[in-house]
Image: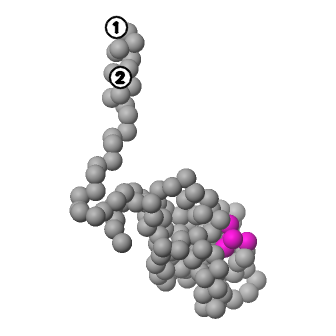
Amino acid sequence: MVRCLIALALVGFALPARAACPLPGEAPMLVVTLYFGESVPGRGPVTAGEWKRFAADVITPAFPDGFTVSDGEGQWRDPASGEIVREDSKVLTVAVAETPALAGKVKAVMDIYDKEFDQTSVGMTTEAACGAF
């Protein structure tokens, strides 16, 4: 009896199951948004040509089914100095199926940008969604 009560109690704390996608043809997806600061320490910002090359050589192979890039105006607090930093940015949005390889692809894109353009970090958000293409 005690085992049964414990099992019922644990079931009550489980995360709710994700609802089925509401529209025909949709499938569960993950929307990944990356925020790339364009200010490069010790020089001018990432140029249009540099971004175009990065998108072609790094983002496209990671997400060949498609993505969207928007221009943004970002602000963040530098963790080392506490200074507020404002800079132009590129905002990358990718809607993809959740796969075991996804985290590695996202991390690789972020790491390559960090290294190539001497960035403190690339921002990231994710959210569950439904979609069709």
Q: Are marks 2 and 1 in contact (CB under 8 Å)?
A: no
Q: Where is residue 96 shown, x and y percent of the image?
A: 45, 64
What is the quadrant of the N terminus in the image? top left
Residue occupied by mark 2: 9
Q: Image point 28% across, 64% down: which residue?
A: 25
The residue closer to the viewer here, 65 or 18, is 65
Residue 23 against residue 90 in the figure, above or below: above
The residue closer to the viewer here, 16 or 83, is 16
Find numbered disc 2 in the image and state the secondary structure of the residue it sits on: helix
Q: Residue furthest front?
A: 25
Determine whether, in the image, residue 121 is placed left or right of residue 65: right
Residue 133 against residue 125 in the figure, above or below: below
Magenta residue span: 111-115
Determine whether, in the image, residue 25 is placed left or right of residue 70: left
Residue 120 against residue 69 in the figure, above or below: above
Q: Image point 37% across, 57% down: which residue?
A: 28
Residue occupied by mark 1: 1
The residue closer to the viewer here, 104 or 76, is 104
What is the quadrant of the C terminus in the image? bottom left
Q: Main secondary structure of the magenta part?
A: helix
Q: Quadrant of residue 80?
A: bottom right
Q: Where is residue 91 shown, x and y percent of the image?
A: 50, 76
